Every structure is written in structure tokens, then in C-alpha cells.
Image (tube, rainbow, N blue to C red):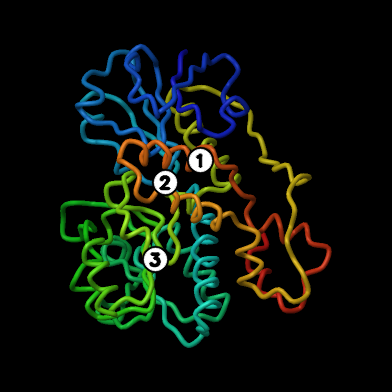
């Protein structure tokens, strides 16, 4: 059995059954031309599956995306081709939750804001939104979940009203990108929402959920004080002005951690093995912590610990170096920054390694597993 996989998928050689022939491709070189000669294809969000990229199925029977989202895949088209699609739903929910908490804490510290005086609207209450809201509540921050489609599907869930959401001080977005239907999310956060005024907008969902032109107008009109973007319209060719004005700007890496990447690979391979009737060994992920330095001192507040022990600052600094580049170069370096930067260890592992948690950092225990 032959599998073609994105070369940047994490630890595939440790997770695949031994009798599989694994071939790798570099997504920076474009869509692989010989894909129809393989039994399965494993991808990330950077590889789009459409009638144009995959005109025929050939031998392909399974395509798996080691990602939580799937708007890069035309699933209806795959169904017509008779190709089964699998993905890693929820694989990076905790990593995104940690990114959001880190970013909000850093923003609040630098802006002199007490988050307990603010109300945060969590837009989308799936795996990721649930993690974010859970962390906020553990920190004593008032938060409201807005997810009308979930309320329609699940009678036991109650969404806050749109009026309640738009009365919040901060919005953090965690929805898929959808173009059609009663609850389409494309440009959901546009002029109507932004006109209500917010202290902070955070988008770690998909580029296009936020209307960036409207966001810039709201920023210049003092309707939005700050915004944090990890995803971009026209990604990877992000808007220079939007990135320059963003409080934090990162290259679609909110869900990047060693644990999340392992889980993404593990889940999509499990889907593939189930489809083909293959058996594989269950392996436990054991990150190498020997080379990880934990930055902590007695005078450090929560925001300082989270910021010092994440790599958000690195991504932010290096993304800003791409501002002003021509589109092709910007796209190439954006992809390289995403793919080749060493990913972080999640906070739970770091906290478990501390011999003693300083008194002022007791809140770190919310990340313990």
C-alpha cells in the first residue's frame, strides 16, 4: 500500500503501520502531479483539494487532512469521486486555547486592563471554543458562548443572543469558514458587528470570518481598540496594513504545539487505518523536555510566564519582517515560517515539570492535566 504525505506532518514514521510505503511531498512545490498513483493522500490546510487540483481519482481511495478544519477540501467533490475523507477534528483545541489565553493576558497586562472587569464573547462553541471558555472561567473572567447552529443541533446547549454577544468587550472567534446557509460565517464579523465597538478582536478561526477592510475602518474610527490575527484573508498573502496595525500578528500557528501536531497525525492515521482495515500500534506521545528551558521567577505574573514560555513573540516578529514583500516571496516565507519553526510544548507539561509553582503563578494550575 502506497501513501503520499505532506513532508511536514509530524512523526508519521512513528505512527504508520510498518508495511506501508510512505512517500513525501513538499507543498511549497505545488500540488503533487502523481497523486492518483497512490492509495491515500495525507495533507495539511496548505493543500487544496478541488476539481482543478485533483481532476481524477485514479487509485486514490482515501484523503486525510491532519487538521481540525476542512474548508480547503471540497468534500462534496470527493464524495462524487468515491474518495473517503478523514480529518483530525479537535486535535489542536487545547493549543489554540492556550494561544488565546496567552494573547489576552499579554494584551491586558500591557494595556493596564483587569480582565475580571471585562466580558468576553466566544464565537463558536465547538472543541476550541469550549477550551477557550473553560480557561476563561477558571481565571474568573466572565464569558458568553455564541453558537446558534449548535443550539439548533443540540437542545441541551443554549447560545447567548446576538445582542448579548455584541455587548461584550472582547470577541474571540472559533468558527469554521462557511459561505452559504442560514449561519454562514464568511465576513460574519463585519461592519454590523464591529460598529458596536470592542476593546479587542481575536481571530484564530479562518481568514474571512473577519472582514479585514471593515476591521481597519473600525480601528481607524476608534470602534476597535486592538486586534490579534493568526489567520488572514488571502492567506498566505496577508494584507500589509492589517499586519502592521495588529497588536499580535502570527502566521496561522495558534494550534501549533508538539502535542497538537502529534494528535493531528495520530487521528488522521487512525481514520485511514480504520478505512483500509489496517492495524497499528498505539503509541503514547512523550515530548523530549530535556532541552526545554522553563522561564520563571518569583516576580513574574501569569502573563509574563505565558508569553516567555510560548513562541508567539517569535512568530510575530518574523511575520512583520514579511510586510512589504512581493506576493510570491511573502507567500513562500509565510509558509516556511509556519512549517519550519520549532513548535512549543503545551503549558500543562511545563507546569508539571516545575518543582514549585510560585504563589503569584497559582493560576498556572488551570493548565495541569
* Residue 226 rendering spot, x and y as whole percentages: 38, 72
User: What SS does tag 1 mark?
Assistant: helix
Residue depicted at x 32% and y 16%: 33
- Mark 1 Cα shell of 10 Å, populated few (<14), some (14-19), many (≥20): many
Residue where numbered disc 2 is placed: 68
* Residue 217 rendering spot, x and y as whole percentages: 22, 70
Residue depicted at x 33% and y 63%: 154
Q: Relative to residue 294, is residue 341 drawn left or right? A: left
Which quarter of the figure is the C terminus placed in? bottom right
Q: Counting residues from the N terminus, which is met first, the one under dot 1 or under dot 2? A: 2
User: What SS does tag 2 mark?
Assistant: loop
Q: Is residue 109 above or below residue 292?
A: below
Residue where numbered disc 1 is placed: 264
* Residue 153 rendering spot, x and y as whole percentages: 29, 60
CA distance for labels 3 and 1? 23 Å
Q: Relative to residue 337, is residue 364 drawn left or right? A: right
- Mark 3 Cα shell of 10 Å, populated few (<14), some (14-19), many (≥20): many
CA distance for labels 2 and 3? 18 Å
Q: Which mark, by number, is residue 281?
A: none
Residue depicted at x 83% and y 63%: 355
Residue where numbered disc 3 is placed: 202
Residue depicted at x 38% and y 39%: 45
Amino acid at each position: 500500500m502506497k501513501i503520499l504525505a505532506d513532508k511536514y506532518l509530524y512523526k508519521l514514521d512513528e505512527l504508520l503501520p510498518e508495511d506501508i510505503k510512505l512517500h513525501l511531498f513538499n507543498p511549497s512545490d505545488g500540488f503533487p502531479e502523481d497523486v492518483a498513483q497512490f492509495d491515500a493522500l495525507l495533507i495539511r490546510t496548505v493543500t487544496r483539494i478541488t476539481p482543478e487540483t485533483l481532476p481524477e481519482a485514479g487509485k486514490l481511495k482515501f484523503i486525510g487532512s491532519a487538521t481540525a478544519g476542512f474548508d480547503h477540501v471540497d468534500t462534496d467533490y470527493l464524495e462524487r469521486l468515491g474518495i473517503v475523507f478523514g480529518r483530525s477534528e479537535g486535535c489542536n483545541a487545547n493549543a489554540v486555547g492556550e494561544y488565546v489565553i496567552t494573547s489576552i493576558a499579554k494584551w491586558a497586562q500591557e494595556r493596564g486592563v483587569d480582565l475580571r472587569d471585562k466580558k468576553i464573547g466566544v464565537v463558536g462553541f465547538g472543541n476550541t471554543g469550549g477550551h477557550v471558555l473553560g480557561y476563561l472561567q477558571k481565571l474568573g473572567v466572565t464569558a458568553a458562548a455564541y453558537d446558534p447552529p449548535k443550539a439548533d443541533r443540540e437542545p441541551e446547549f443554549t447560545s447567548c443572543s446576538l445582542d448579548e454577544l455584541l455587548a461584550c468587550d472582547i470577541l474571540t472567534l472559533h468558527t469554521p469558514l462557511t459561505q452559504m446557509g442560514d449561519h454562514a460565517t464568511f465576513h460574519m464579523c463585519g461592519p454590523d458587528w464591529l460598529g458596536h465597538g470592542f476593546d479587542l478582536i481575536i481571530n484564530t478561526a479562518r481568514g474571512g470570518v473577519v472582514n479585514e477592510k471593515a476591521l481597519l475602518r473600525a480601528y481607524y474610527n476608534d470602534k476597535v481598540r486592538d486586534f490579534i490575527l493568526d489567520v488572514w484573508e488571502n492567506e498566505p498573502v496577508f494584507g500589509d496594513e492589517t499586519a502592521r496595525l495588529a497588536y499580535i500578528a502570527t502566521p496561522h500557528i495558534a494550534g501549533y504545539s508538539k502535542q497538537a501536531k502529534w494528535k493531528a497525525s495520530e487521528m488522521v492515521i487512525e481514520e485511514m487505518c480504520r478505512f483500509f482495515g489496517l492495524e497499528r500500534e498505539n503509541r503514547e506521545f512523550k515530548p523530549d523536555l530535556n532541552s526545554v528551558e522553563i522561564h520563571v521567577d518569583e516576580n513574574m505574573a501569569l502573563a509574563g510566564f505565558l508569553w516567555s514560555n510560548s513562541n508567539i513573540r517569535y512568530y510575530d516578529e518574523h511575520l512583520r519582517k514579511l510586510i512589504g514583500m512581493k506576493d510570491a516571496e511573502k507567500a513562500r516565507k509565510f509558509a516556511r515560517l509556519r512549517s519550519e519553526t520549532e513548535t512549543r510544548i503545551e503549558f500543562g507539561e511545563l507546569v508539571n515539570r516545575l518543582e514549585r509553582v510560585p504563589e503569584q503563578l497559582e493560576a498556572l494550575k488551570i493548565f495541569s492535566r
